[in-house]
Amino acid sequence: NLLSQQTQPASAQALYGVLRQQQAIGLATVYRALEALKLHGFIQSRASANGESLYSLVEQDQHYLTCLQCGRSVPLDHCPIQELEERLQHSVPFKIYYHTLEFFGLCEPCTESVD
């Protein structure tokens, strides 16, 4: 699985770039496959600072601090709402595949450049 080889979430364009070197495939096919995998709960997506969707395996769940100026994302060490997800999983008739958590602001270098 190509996503399992990624060290960070990847865009459909980036995945397409790798896949088309191995086989004849269209970008629309990559998007359709990613959407099907997401609907089945195998992968998750999050939007980058520029609005591009980034995909990763659900097992690689990560949460971020994202800079609105430079787009840099810094992963958080732990998930502060994991316990809530587990409680919801047992208390509501809803199958939760994943959740996303992202804080937006300015990283230190961008904060200094604004001042």
Image (cartoon, rainbow, N blue to C red):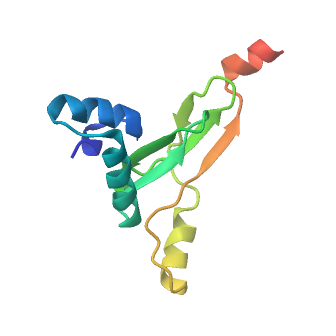
Camera sees residue 11: no
Residue under the image location 69 percent in, 22 percent down: 108
Q: Quadrant of the C terminus?
A: top right
Q: Position of residue 34 (x, y in %)?
A: 36, 52
Residue 20 against residue 34 in the figure, above or below: above
Residue at the right extreme? 115
Q: Position of residue 105 (x, y in %)?
A: 72, 34
Residue at 30%, 29% in the rendered image: 17
Which residue is pictured at 57% across the width and 69% down the height?
84
- Farthest residue in the left direction? 22
Q: Is residue 110 left or right of residue 51?
A: right
The location of residue 37, given as percent across then percent down, is 34, 59
- In the image, 65 versus 45, the foreground residue is 45
List x then y, in percent, for residue 12. Answer: 39, 40
> Residue at left 16%, top 36%?
23
Relative placement, left or right, of 44 versus 7 is right
Does 100 sit left or right of 7 as displayed?
right
Q: How many marks?
A: 0
Seen in the picture, residue 82 relative to 3 is either above or below; the reply is below
Q: Is residue 23 visible?
A: yes
Relative vertical location of residue 46 with respect to residue 24 in this rendering, above or below: below
